[in-house]
Image: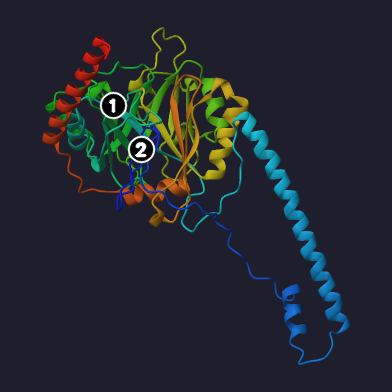
Amino acid sequence: TSCLLREAQTSICSAGGAVGGMAMAVAFAAPRGTLLPQQTAPAPGGLAEASAKSLARPSGAPSVGEHVLSKAGMALALGVAAARRRVHRRRAKAARVAQRSGAVAEVATPVREGQRTVGRAAHWVIRTTNLKRTVDFCSEVLSLKVLRHEELEAGCKITCNGAYAKPWSKTMVGFRTEDLGYCLEVTYTYGVESYIEGSGLKHIAVTVADVKAALEAATRLGYAAEGDVVTGPEAYKFRLISQPAGRSERFFYSAVRVKNLAKAEEFYTAIGLKALGLGLVGGPGFLSALGVEEAAVRVMGFGGEEEVPLVLIEDAKSPLFKLQAWEGRNLLSIPTTELKSAYNTVIEKKPAGGRVLHKLQSEPLNKLLNVPDLEIAVLVAPEGFEVGIVSSESFDPAVKSAYNPEAVIDYVWREKHMAQVLEEMAQVEALKKTGS
């Protein structure tokens, strides 16, 4: 994501926007620093306690014990210093090797209290050519609310809004704050009038309080429904499911088509996901909604609580399998250590043909957040799906801070801005034709 982080509202463009697109543009640069692991007190009876006792003697020459202790302390200090030099040399060598291969050094990151220790799916990036229409659909049919909205004057440096060097906006919609729940990142690029529908993204499953009422709301708005699947704005499909008892997360899963299930599973396993079994999302109508047999399906995730997994559906015989910018991007929030390991695996092994679209980069965040720089990269799965990965230690606090439910989308201003953008684009084209 390349996005603007404002004073009280830290903004992140998801990997569907650093975060999806996922490039991240950041306005506040915090001083870079090193987080030190929490120090622990020496064990009772250890060297520190023995030293304290010997120094408590009122006066006189050092005892034999103290003399031996001082020698032991010096030897220990020299040993520690030598060990540190060896570690430094090993790390320097690893860094040189990593630099040549494009990989990054993997250093363990301290875990803070309350911090997630497993990865999670954070959001999916979708496109729109009519923001109001999409927001209204999300609100009236899916019961989603706007979590934050941003207007950006330059294209996302990691193509969150697609490969467009134009002003754009992103609107995060969901049920709860982004650090806790899954959401959609809706990107709108000024001057883009249509998107070609791809064949990879099948549907996104969302739970609602009343499926029948949600389907009726979709019909009133003019959207087609087939069974429990609604085709919404820009031809995105959403499967509506009754909210399971005891589940807080309202998104249920995202489903994509792949031509080679084994290759897709190999790639996602290599970056830290695992096959979870159909029981996690299975239920009445699951396989019929996908239109395939059980053997053609894999449910991939990290195994966390109330996860929103990725469902892979093999469609090897489809002659029309083609991905477009319309497919958007899936964003994963992963602890830094696991993120760097996943990134290096893709760089060095290219599992199942997977590759890197945007190299790993660090983005300083608002220093008031007191978190490490955000680590972000965008990968490409074997079938061409874009997968953004961000460091959860930084991403989760940042999007929590950016939460702005009072955000008002000024559609009147947007219309005027659109006219201005189109006029400027026309002027640029005119200059190109005249050779000026």
Q: Look at label 2 and name its amino acid.
A: Cys
Disc 2 from disc 1: Cα separation:
15 Å
284, 226: nearer the viewer: 226
State how many labels appear: 2
Numbered mark located on residue 302 in the image? none
Location of residue 168 in the rendering, given as x and y in whole percent from the top left corner: 27, 31
**Label 2 CA crowd tier, 10 Å (few <14, some 14–19, many 20+):** many
Labels 2 & 1 near each other (Cβ < 8 A): no
Q: Is residue 105 visible?
A: yes
Q: Look at label 1 and name its amino acid.
A: Lys
Q: Which residue is mark 1?
A: 166
Q: Which colour assignment does the render follow? A: rainbow
- Residue lying at 16% horizontally and 33% vertically, measured from the top left: 414
In the picture, measured across the screen, residue 191 lies left or right of residue 283, that is: left
Location of residue 129 in the rendering, given as x and y in whole percent from the top left corner: 22, 24
Quadrant, the C terminus: top left
Numbered mark located on residue 13 in the image? 2
Vertical relation: 273 (above or below) 195:
below
143, 112: nearer the viewer: 112
Residue lying at the far front of the rendered structure: 436
Residue lying at the far right of the rendered structure: 64
Tag 1 or tag 2, which sits nearer the N-term? 2
Location of residue 340 in the rendering, given as x and y in whole percent from the top left corner: 56, 39
In the picture, measured across the screen, residue 133 lies left or right of residue 22, that is: left
Vertical relation: 77 (above or below) 82:
below
435, 138: nearer the viewer: 435
**Label 1 CA crowd tier, 10 Å (few <14, some 14–19, many 20+):** some
Q: Is residue 226 visible?
A: no
* Element assignment for label 2: loop
